[in-house]
Image (tube, rainbow, N blue to C red):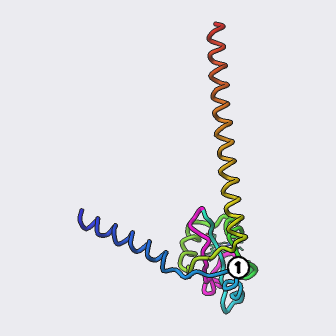
Amino acid sequence: LFVLFCQTATTVQKYSMSDKELKEYTSEDVSKHTTTDSCWLIIGNSSNGGPKVYDVTKYLDDHPGGAEVMLDVAGQNADEFFEDIGHSKEARNELAKYLIGNYKLTEEEMAKMKADAEKKAAQGGSSSMMLIVLVALVAIYIAYSQMNS
Ligand code: HEM
């Protein structure tokens, strides 16, 4: 039990430290790496702990989807493209090997992310409201049909 405790403590420490130690890159930094000699991508979003910066230069020739698609979005935010393909878990594990840092959102991106989150929260709120109304209607219907039988 003690060994298990020590292992958990070290893992927790490792993860929390590695996240803090990651360098932070701006869109200006990332935008300088757009060639086969140095190709960086921004991938990830608030739902998976991102966005993060990846140096995928060494993976270009190994990518099953080809080097071209990656070079097309080099130096930019490729999260939507990466997600749209529906990359497998293996692809995501592979991606993790090329992590070099966190991405520093611009003011504009930060505002957009906040607005998106608020929109999502509002949508969630209205759908749960609809569920409550639906349950109430069903209850009224059952009560009404029992009264008449
Ligand atoms: C380091 C980043 C990336 C990794 C590790 C990666 C990995 C992979 C892997 C392993 C596959 C094979 C299918 C699968 O297992 O899902 C794949 C397919 C593919 N990827 Fe990526 N990928 C990366 C980035 C991207 C980006 C940024 C794009 C688009 C801009 C892209 C477009 C594609 C396409 C088009 C395919 C082929 C899908 C098919 O033919 O069914 N990938 N990728």
- Determine the residue positioned at 48% across, 76% down: 20
Q: What stretch is highlighted in magenta?
A: 47-66
* The quarter of the displayed image where residue 129 is located: top right
Q: x, y percentage for residue 8? A: 34, 67
Q: In which quarter of the image is residue 23?
A: bottom right
Q: Where is residue 17 in the image (x, y as percent from the top left)?
A: 43, 76
> Residue most toward the top?
149
Location of residue 132 with respect to 90 vertically, above or below: above
In this view, the residue in front, 127 or 80, is: 127
Q: Nearer the viewer, residue 56 or 41?
A: 41
Residue at 62% in and 22% down? 139
Q: In which quarter of the image is ligand 1?
A: bottom right
Tell whether 49 sits left or right of 60.
Answer: left
The furthest residue to the right: 72
Verify whether residue 54 appears in magenta.
yes
Residue 113 part of the magenta-drawn span: no
136 relative to 145, above or below: below
Residue located beneath label 1 in the image: 70
- Which residue is depicted at the point 59% across and 71% down? 91
Q: Residue at x 67, y 68 (%)?
A: 110
User: Which quarter of the rendered picture does the N terminus lie within?
Assistant: bottom left
Residue type beneath disc 1:
Met
Residues 17 and 99: in front is 17
Residue count near mark 1 (Cα–Cα under 10 Å), binned few <14, some 14–19, many ≥20: many
Image quadrant containing the C terminus: top right
CB at disc 1 and ligand 1 closer than 8 Å:
yes
Circle 1 SS class: helix
